[in-house]
Image (tube, grey):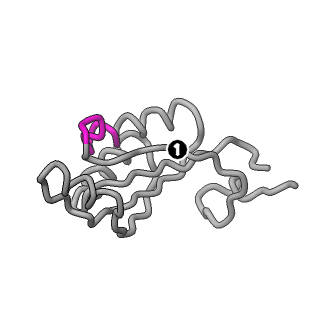
Amino acid sequence: MLPIDVELIVVIIERGKADKIIKKAKEAGARGATVFYGRGTGESDIGHWIGRNIDQAKEVILILTETGEKEKKIMEAVVEAGKIREPGTGIAFTLPVKHLFGLAYREDFETWED
């Protein structure tokens, strides 16, 4: 078990928007983020029906943070920066982290008792 509760914030947005979102997340307290690229699969069907070409290229942002006020501030910042409340702009969600190793700046994250 981790000595404190940790959450993984996941943000999936259109390609090219990650830098702005990460900047705002850091201003809200995030120490860093991991970004990788992906491709959406469900949007091509939707785009066909509404007569709109939706870009399938995505950026996926992963941010680890402590659960609580810090998590809420970071989540609010990424949702606002990515305009995620607007339809079709992206998705943001959190997942609880059960085991975590390898964060040099947070030794207490590395303690694991089963």
Residue found 72% across the figure and 57% down from its top: 99
Q: Is residue 74 above or below residue 37?
A: above
Where are the magenta residues, as a range?
A: 78-87
Q: In this view, does 37 lie above or below 64?
A: below
| Residue 31, x across and y down, in percent | 46, 52
Residue found 67% across the figure and 41% down from its top: 5
| Residue 100, x across and y down, in percent | 68, 59
The stretch drawn in magenta includes residue 81:
yes
Residue found 77% across the figure and 56% down from its top: 111
| Residue at the farthest top position | 69
Location of the C terminus by quadrant is bottom right
| Residue 49, x across and y down, in percent | 19, 51
Dot 1: element: strand
Q: Which amino acid, mark 1? A: Thr
| Residue at the farthest left position | 51
Quadrant of residue 59 within the rendered picture: bottom left
| Residue at the farthest right position | 114
Q: How crowded is mark 1: few (under 14 residues within 10 Å), some or many (20 or more)?
A: some
Q: Is residue 106 found left or right of 9 in the rendered image?
A: right
| Circle 1 residue | 94
| Residue 17, x across and y down, in percent | 24, 56
77 vs 85, nearest the viewer: 85
